[in-house]
Every structure is written in C-alpha cells, then in structure tokens.
C-alpha cells in the first residue's frame, strides 16, 4: 500500500493531481517515466538490493491482465480447458501454441 501511495504522491508532485485524475496522455507519460526509472534502477542495483516497486507493480498488472477473460480471449489464443483431447485440432503453421 505504501508503494501505491507513493505513486499517487509522485503524480501529485509532477502533475498537481492524483494518478486517477490524470488524462490518458498524462498517465502514459507518467508510467513511461516510472518504467524508465525502474529499468535503470534494476540494471544498476546490487544483488542484495530490493527490486524497484514499479517493476513489481508492472509484473502484477500484466499477470492480472493475462489471467483475465479479456486478456485470455482477446490477447492470447484461448482454448477452453478442461476439454477433450482432439488430435486433429486445426493448426496452421505459425499459430501460437498456448496451454495451461
């Protein structure tokens, strides 16, 4: 929770409003700057140092999206499981393989 509060504090400092109140363009700019900072930190940190908060937030966000219905059905190739085995399931060369 402390990390999320810091995100809002940082948005307040940079844009004079909370993160939720930023426009789509401001949010994109904010996230890109935070991501750049996190990548620099990660590449220069010592082995024993903690990961950057934004790195963890980004990983959790991506996990949440790709395990959601929209992420699974629209961004990934989705085949409902459990289901019967179908050895002649249509496959075209170059199709993404995805299994749970």
Image: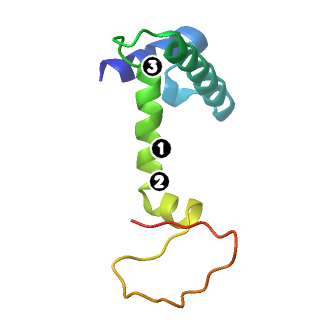
Classed neighbour count for the residue bearing mark 2: other residues with Cα under 10 Å, few (<14), some (14–19), many (≥20): some
> Which image quadrant is residue 91 in?
bottom right
Compared with 34, 69 (above or below) is: below
Compared with 51, 68 (above or below) is: below
Residue annotated with mark 3: 8
> Which image quadrant is residue 90 in?
bottom right
Distance CA(mark 1)–CA(mark 2)? 6 Å
For the view shown, which residue lies furthest in the left direction? Answer: 1
* Disc ID at residue 62: 1
Percent of width and height locating residue 48: 33, 11
Compared with 30, 79 (above or below) is: below
Compared with 29, 43 (above or below) is: above
Indicate which label's residue lies in the foreground, 2 or 3.
Answer: 2
Labels in figure, total: 3
Q: Nearer the viewer, residue 95 or 62?
A: 95
Discs 1, 2 touching: Cβ within 8 Å? yes
Quarter of the picture containing the C terminus is bottom left
Percent of width and height locating residue 46: 42, 9
Residue sitting at x 58%, y 11%: 14
Q: Nearer the viewer, residue 26 or 68?
A: 68
Residue sitting at x 36%, y 20%: 3
Please give left or right for residue 50 compared with residue 21 in the image.
Answer: left
- Determine the secondary structure under disc 1: helix
* Disc ID at residue 66: 2
């Amino acid at each position: 929770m402390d990390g999320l509060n810091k995100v809002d504090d940082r948005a307040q400092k940079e844009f004079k409003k909370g993160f939720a109140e930023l426009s789509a363009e401001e949010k994109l700019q904010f996230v890109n700057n935070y991501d750049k900072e996190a990548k620099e930190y990660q590449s220069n940190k010592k082995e024993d140092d903690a990961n950057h908060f934004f790195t963890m937030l980004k990983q959790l966000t991506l996990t949440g999206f790709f395990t959601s219905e929209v992420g699974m059905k629209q961004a990934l190739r989705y085949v409902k499981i459990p289901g019967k085995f179908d050895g002649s399931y249509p496959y075209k060369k170059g199709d993404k393989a995805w299994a749970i």
